[in-house]
Image: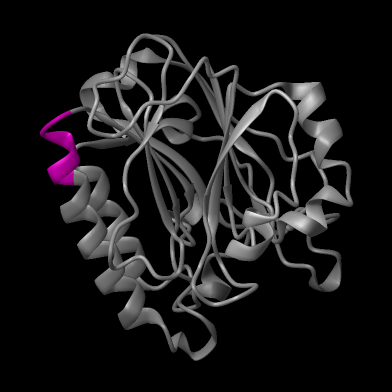
């Protein structure tokens, strides 16, 4: 199974940049999207159509802001969350009551829960750092509750470069949003809580990025950050066959990241 994750920085925007062609070329079994920036009205009007995929949306209450979505290919049918899934069925767990920014989706894909997360950005002057840390702590508690039922695959835009190898200019960015001591320490704590960063496990010394600023030709010069991750419950990390970053794919300031997993 191939699962991809991509912060598209606006679903409408990426569709104009051949998003359908991307789907047709790569044919992921599941594609998790962050920062879709669409509202419930667009979803109600079925404004978007992705042939061959079933769409799950979690828009923010604030119009044109944040939001997540999951596209899943070749689903035979869907059941209510109260019924156990049959082979091949996928079930979306209910939206969390405290997720008013549309940042979290949990999809039951059979043997594991797939969690799609768009973590908050600490913002310039770290104006949302406290909000982010509270969000992260609350989310980790939710992960531990979910783990009592099934192992987790957690993917998305974490908005943090964990180690110095994960950004082009670490010394210049100490204390910057996404590279504060607090954010990095939380990522360490998350991994120590029983998760594996799949890319870093497979590529311990590889320098590759998943996000670049739009300013000063950063992507062309590869002055980037690795802030998009796939993490999996440690005892199930042996099921990961490959973990990768698709850094040549255009369409957003982020690159898609992915895993191939076998159960």
- For the C terminus, give its image quadrant: top left
**In-front residue for pair 170/208:** 208
Colour mode of the rendering: one colour
User: Would you identify the image quadrant in which residue 12 lies?
Assistant: bottom right
Residue 64 seen in the figure: yes
* Vertical placement of residue 191 versus 178, above or below: above
Magenta stretch in the rendered image: 144-149
Q: Position of residue 13 (x, y in %)?
A: 81, 58
User: Residue shown at 80%/33% (left/top)?
Assistant: 22
Residue pictured at 34% horizontal, 54% vertical: 95
Q: Is residue 148 magenta?
A: yes
Instruction: Decide whether the magenta segment is chiefly helix, strand or loop.
Output: helix
Q: Position of residue 142 (x, y in %)?
A: 20, 51
Residue toward you, 7 or 192:
7
- 87 versus 40 height, above or below: above
Residue 240 location (% of width, % of height): 42, 18
In the image, 190: left or right of 39?
Answer: left
Kindly identify the residue that appears in the image at 22 percent across and 32 percent down.
82
Q: Is residue 231 above or below residue 96?
A: above
Q: Name the residue rendered at 89%, 52% in the picture.
A: 16
- Residue sitting nearer the eye, 29 or 249: 29
Total marks shown come to 0
Residue 38 visible, this angle = no
Q: Does 74 lie within the magenta span? A: no
Tell me: 178 left or right of 49.
Answer: left
Q: Position of residue 132 (x, y in %)?
A: 35, 73
**Which quadrant holds residue 100?**
bottom left
């Amino acid at each position: 199974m191939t699962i991809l994750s991509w912060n598209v920085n606006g679903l409408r925007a990426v569709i104009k940049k051949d998003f359908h062609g991307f789907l047709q070329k790569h044919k992921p079994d599941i594609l998790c999207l962050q920062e879709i920036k669409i509202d419930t009205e667009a979803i109600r009007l079925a404004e978007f159509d992705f042939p061959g995929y079933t769409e799950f949306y979690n828009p923010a209450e604030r119009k044109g802001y944040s939001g997540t979505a999951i596209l899943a290919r070749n689903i035979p049918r869907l059941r209510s969350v109260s019924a156990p899934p049959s082979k091949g069925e996928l079930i979306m767990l209910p939206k969390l009551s405290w997720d008013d920014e549309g940042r979290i989706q949990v999809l039951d894909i059979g043997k594991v829960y797939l969690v799609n997360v768009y973590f908050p950005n600490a913002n310039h002057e770290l104006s949302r750092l406290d909000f982010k840390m509270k969000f992260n702590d609350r989310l980790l508690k939710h992960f531990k509750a979910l783990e009592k039922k099934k192992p987790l695959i957690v993917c998305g835009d974490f908005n943090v470069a964990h180690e110095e190898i994960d950004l082009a200019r670490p010394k210049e960015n100490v204390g910057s949003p996404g590279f504060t001591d607090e954010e990095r320490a939380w990522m360490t704590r998350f991994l120590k809580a029983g998760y594996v960063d799949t890319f870093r496990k497979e590529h311990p010394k590889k320098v590759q990025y998943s996000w670049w600023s739009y300013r000063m030709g950063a992507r062309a010069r590869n002055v980037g950050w690795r802030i998009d991750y796939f993490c999996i419950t440690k005892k199930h990390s042996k099921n990961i066959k490959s973990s990768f970053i698709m850094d040549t794919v255009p369409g957003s300031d982020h690159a898609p990241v992915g895993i191939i997993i076998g159960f």
